[in-house]
Image: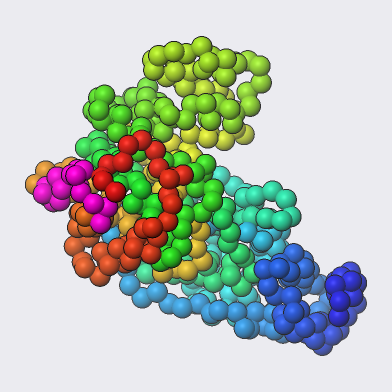
Amino acid sequence: MNYIEIKDFFDKLDEHTEQEILTVIQYINKNYRSNYNWLLMQEFIERIFKLKNIDKSKILYELFKKESKFFWWGEKLDIPERLKFGIEIEVANLPLNTIRSAFESNTITDILKILGVPTDISNQIVQNSDFEKKNEPTKWIFSREGEGLAYDESEASSPILKNNVFDLNQIVAICTLLKALNAQLHGGTGLHINLGVDYLECNEKAIENILRIWGECEELFFKMANREGETIRIGAHQMATPIKENIQNFFESDGSITLKTEEDMVKFLYQIQARNRMDTIIGWSDFGKEPDLEYELYCAKTDEQRFKVYKMYNDEIKKRADENDKVRFTSINFNHMEWNSDTPGRIEIRIFNSSLDPEIIFQDLLLVGKIFEVSLRNAKDSNYKKDEFNRLTLHNVTENDKVDNLLNLLFDKSAQRIIFKKRWQSVKKENYKTYESGKDTFER
């Protein structure tokens, strides 16, 4: 069958017998189930979901029987149990309508069963999923991420999860499903990890520690962010912009963190995430002629005046529910944090490439979870890893020494240190200048 013949078959799908459809599925699986023919494959999958006058169970089995099956993740991660988290997995070549059709046609349960997902995990996902919603902390939310046919991107955002085997296996199930639906990854797809701020117990010293670790080692985190041999994605310099320069300037000029009021939080975001990116942030926004923030920024000569422009920008963002706050496009993002609040929000780490490998995702969770754990424990007990913190600030060292100092601070287990040392070693010679800012904190 050529492309036109398959399209004609699609257009009259309901008129064909079960056996005819099974035969075409076998042909398409053999000849079209690849990244190069993703659009044809997705259209076929979506139409199968919508079949009405035929038993779809055999057809679904034929479609997904050779896909990678669910595997059970049998242990908790080595991060604090009360550290809540969520993930956002971006994928390409998977239209949102394909995912939506699987759920709305009630075929999703059958698909998850064919893929070997346990019933309790499947029921949790099916009963707690929705589409294109915001601020739904109890559900998996699927949304459209990109534009155009060439890179039709979707995103799966998790509910708030805990460090237990059941929640971790929800991630395994979602990765299994997305792969079965022919999802692909490319240089623009990212994995975002959100960590609950409530874990930090409103301890401002813990935030200071997180910033000091990040400001000292941001380049290293970019190099350790992905599986061995995989460099940082193309779009990271825009969607996960380095902020080391801002952090260093913050500690050199003031360094005291106060997050008591809303004004404190606005100032904190300006100092840490916006100060060296104001032209980009204002340029991305479309507020019309009033206020003319580009002109106001052009006229601002001092840092105090630039901060006033940022406050104007922040006020406008709050008025416009449909406006995305571009301040969040940094390597580590505090923009969703609400300090001293009953709902303190989250801190988002945006450096990771997207992955459909649960083991890689769990390694990434381990890395950022340890940053939080070490930062809080030292904030509550200044003697905890005091020497390791001091060694991290040494600048007259090689990059290899800096890596060892960082990993010794974060991990007590040698097996964990080896994971991230190998990640770094596999890309250490790559050119990462695009993702650096400010002065190097260690000698090359």
Q: Looking at the picture, does residue 398 appear above or below residue 244?
A: below
Give left or right: position of 255 versus 142: left
Q: Is residue 365 visible?
A: no
Of residues 149 and 86, the one drawn nearer to the viewer in this rendering: 149
- Where residue 374 appears, as percent x and y from the top left, is 22, 51
The residue sitting at 31% across, 44% down in the picture is 214
Q: In the visual, does 416 lie left or right of 266?
A: left
Q: In which image quadrant can residue 189 be found?
A: bottom right
Q: Is residue 444 above or below residue 174?
A: above
Q: How is the image coloured?
A: rainbow
Q: Residue at x 66, y 16 (%)?
A: 289
Residue located at (77% from left, 68% from top): 40
Residue 149: x, y in percent?
A: 74, 55
Which residue occupies the extreme left position in the image?
383
Locate residue 215, reporting x and y percent.
Answer: 30, 40
Find the magenta span and give its range.
Answer: 384-400
Between residue 289 and residue 435, name the one nearer to us.
435
Q: Is residue 391 magenta?
A: yes
In terms of depth relative to the viewer, which is nearer, 201 or 404?
404
Coordinates of residue 298 in the picture (x, y in percent):
53, 15
Q: Quadrant of residue 77?
A: bottom left
Q: Is residue 375 magenta?
A: no
331 left or right, relative to 425? right
